[in-house]
Image (cartoon, helix red, strand yellow):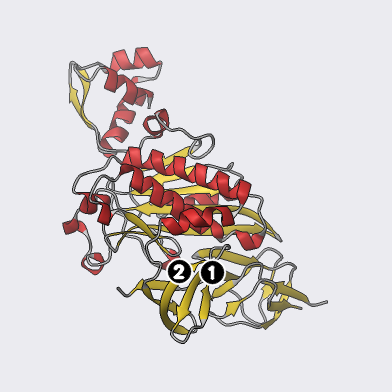
Amino acid sequence: MEILGFLRKHHERFISGAEISRALRVSRTAVWKHVGSLRSAGFSIEAHPSQGYRLTEEPDLLLPADLQEGLQTRFVARELHHLLSTDSTNRVARDLAAKGAPEGTTVIAEAQTRGRGRLGRTWFSPPRTNLYASIILRPRIPMPSVPQLTLVGAVAACRAIGRVYNGPGELGPRIKWPNDILMGGRKVSGTLVEAASLGEMLDYVVLGIGVNVNLEEKDLPTELAATATSLLIAGGRKVSRKTLACALFEEIEATYERFRAEGFAKLSGEYAALSDIWGRQVRVTLSEGVIEGTAEGLDSDGALRVSLAGGASERILAGDVQLLR
Amino acid sequence: MPTDVAAHITGTVWKIEAKVGDSVLEGDTIIILESMKMEMPVEAPASGSITEIRVNEGSAVSEGDVLAVIG
């Protein structure tokens, strides 16, 4: 990365391999190899046989050094692993966590080849367009509270998206219980939270968040066209992925710290205020069947309360919620 | 002595990763539960062989319910 910094500093002129190798005390072969890897990462570097190298164009990448420059966090994304492509950032984060990576360790990728949604569903993950991040958390909380981290992630993602979004208010981000973020009724962000325990104790949680950022309408796969959206589609202009990533990491840290200090009950009001499903008709697909009713509210533990025709009320902990109107 | 494999959260059974007769080691994942879209593996508290599985994929379970028994 020092070579990239050097090329950036002198982007107005060619600098020779010898000059770079002297200044950074690396071999000329190392310079040449590094230029090659920068190129395959999408950097345009002009090479002239007698004059050397010149950086002409940079891809929009989420390079850790750039990202951490403006980042206001204490522990989230302080250890940041950046990958050009991976199968799934959650998988990489779980491996790091199993080897003892500290709380806050974060994995981001420009592209995922097997981006995972919940229950083995896939998450469409083209390169350099969206944000894919997985954060390792190690809270000391009782097991039954652990699933509430899904809701913590949803609050953070919704707030972060709200910080960078400038489009029409009616298309602003809203939470759909438990963890989807919708804009104009279409999904812009999803979360996959995975936990691992050591016997009776929680070992770690990986909070994986995918946000569709600069995905264009025409690039959405047909099967997602009606149900998915992006910040670009909703707001009509491109959004800096770096700004969004920083906002996301800051919101995750702040929301998580409050959750750890005060528990979910204190956050539930804020969660409810970020959602617009209350009072609306919903269809909930449960493992035992389908129910329809009115989304009534959130219990203090995060369960969704749905009132059924006839006055009965159902507490939902696992199920897919569909808004009917 | 048989050991109970109990649910540590309330939710639903997403996946059953072992079957009756399987020998398992302490720490092996037996069942994966789901609650509020979080996936939570339930591990074998002891080594042995599975003598009973009391739930199906999709079953709703409460914290403390016995999901399986290791003999």
Which part of the image, by quadrant, shows the N terminus of chain A? top left
The residue indicated by pointer 1 is B34
- Which residue does the image show at 50% across and 56% down from the upper left? A269
How many numbered circles are shown?
A: 2
Instruction: Describe residue A57's horizontal placement relative to residue B5 as left or right.
Output: left
Cα distance between the residues tagged 2 and 1: 9 Å
Residue A2 percent location from the top left of the image: 38, 23
Instruction: Describe residue A124's horizontal placement relative to residue A308 as left or right.
Output: left
The amino acid type, in three-letter code, at marker 2 is: Leu
- Which residue does the image show at 23% across and 53% down from the upper left? A234
Residue A145 position (above or below residue A47): below
Q: Secondary structure at mark 2?
A: helix
The label number, if any, that marks residue A119 in the structure image: 2
Residue A242 position (above or below residue B49): above
Residue A91 visible in the current orientation: no
The amino acid type, in three-letter code, at marker 1 is: Glu
Residue A12 percent location from the top left of the image: 19, 17
Q: Quadrant of residue A114?
A: bottom left
State the residue in front, A292 or A112.
A292
Q: Are marks 2 and 1 on the same chain?
A: no
Q: Give the residue furthest to the bottom.
A: A310
State the residue in front, A273 or A98.
A273
Instruction: Describe residue B10's horizontal placement relative to residue A280 as left or right.
Output: right
- Which residue does the image show at 50% across and 53% down from the upper left? A152
Q: Give the residue furthest to the front.
A: A311
Chain at tag 2: A
In the rendered structure, are the residues bearing label 2 and label 1 in contact, judged by CB atoms less than 8 Å apart?
A: yes
How packed mark 1 is, by other alpha carbons closer than 10 Å (few <14, some 14-19, many 20 or more), is many
Q: Quadrant of residue B66?
A: bottom right
Residue A120 percent location from the top left of the image: 43, 67
Which part of the image, by quadrant, shows the C terminus of chain A? bottom left
